Image: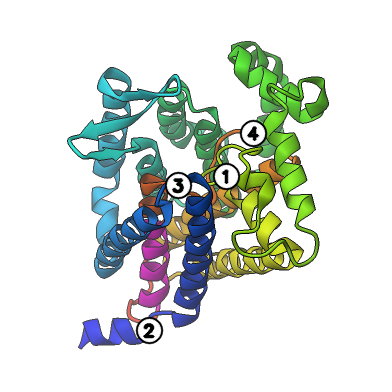
Amino acid sequence: MRRNGLLALVDWKALTILVALMVMGLVNLWSASEGMGVPFYQRQLLWLAVGGFFGLLVFSIDYRHYEGLAYLLYGLGMGLLVVVLLIGVEVGGAKRWIEMGWLRFQPSEYMKLGLVIGLARYFYRRPRPRGYSLRDLAVPFLMVLGPAALVALEPDLGTALLLFLIFFGVVLFCGIRRRSLLILLAALASSAPLGWSLLKDYQRRRILAFLDPYSDPLGSGYHLIQSKIAVGSGGLWGKGFLGGTQCKLQFLPQYHTDFAFALLGEEWGFVGCAIVLILFLLLILWGLETAFKAKDRFGAVIAVGVTAMIFIHVAVNIGMVLGMLPVVGLPLPFFSYGGSCTVAHMMGVGLLLNVRSRRHLLAPRRT
């Protein structure tokens, strides 16, 4: 009875938005496959099926049970990040994947969910109605510093920064004292020179290319220049399905992964891009609404953390494609080709549906 009641309370509007994004992403990858001669969309369909299975599994378990497993899941994620540095597969100068026979996966993608659940337990167990002080935030800060440091060593600066942004979004939602927030922002600003000195040469070149891509048009600025040309050439209605010459003629690399939105803009124009942005906006607003309507703080923080993860991926990827942000290599959920990112985001949506559906079935817990 409870299981049937839970299925009856599933938010089918959100599932419709998700299916629409997945279908559009598959169509986009179909076009990319035709241009590169590799069946990316067939492989992505497989990853969506795998992600759907794990998303359903995550959804089917009462999210309150994850509280007892929170630190175990977090510790497992940390362990995998250490393993990937020791025996991980190196691709393009970065160790980000663990290979087990035919299976290759990226632990940092799943660490995002482990961090969200770990933070949710901490803030649920330690409510501060008047806001959190810097002392209160010391432990959760260390919780994000550990995985971020390991990810940065791979190196993957984009994902490391994303972990900190998830933490910052959760803190803002849970509440932070104004004085503590001002001190935190001042500390971040003052540490910028140190951060710059720690960057690798290619990372500095990417930031400088963002400021002036034409200073190195055939090097660090190449992706930004070609991406903006591809999106701009699409005009209002685009060049049509399979008609993206800028991408298909290989002027823009990686248009099946990090620059999938550029291919979308070239073939489907402003209208196609606007539809995708509206769908993502609806999904993000739905996630925030889920957080505010959750029965307890644990579920609310899970919802905020997952929503922040999706929002940051979308904002940074599209900002990167349009030349509004430096190239950092964050994929666009449900559009960029990649198994780990796809499965992790499907599991994240499963968590959101879990919190959303059970708000009608559960009695409020202490917060």
Spot occupied by residue 338 in the image (x, y as percentages of width and height):
41, 46
* Marks 1 & 3, CB-CB < 8 Å contact: no
Q: Earlier in the sequence, mark 2 or mark 4?
A: 2
* Front label number (2 vs 4): 4
Q: Which residue is mark 2?
A: 9
Which amino acid type is marked by label 4? Val
Residue at 48 percent across and 68 percent down: it is 23
Q: Which residue is mark 1?
A: 255
Which amino acid type is marked by label 3? Gly
284 sits left or right of 145 in the view: right
- Alpha-carbon distance for marks 2 and 4? 40 Å
Compared with 57, 134 (above or below) is: above
* Marks 1 & 2, CB-CB < 8 Å contact: no
The kind of secondary structure element at disc 1 is loop
Mark 2 packing: few (<14 Cα in 10 Å), some, or many (20+)? some
Name the main secondary structure of what is drawn in magenta.
helix
Q: Earlier in the sequence, mark 3 or mark 4?
A: 3
Front residue (pair 361, 307): 307
Which amino acid type is marked by label 2? Leu
- Alpha-carbon distance for marks 3 and 4? 26 Å
* Marks 1 & 4, CB-CB < 8 Å contact: no
* Front label number (1 vs 4): 1
The kind of secondary structure element at disc 3 is loop
- Extent of the magenta region: 346-359
- Alpha-carbon distance for marks 1 and 2? 38 Å
Compared with 249, 50 (above or below) is: below
- Alpha-carbon distance for marks 1 and 3? 13 Å
Residue 267 can be seen in this image: yes
Q: Which residue is mark 3?
A: 37
Mark 3 packing: few (<14 Cα in 10 Å), some, or many (20+)? few
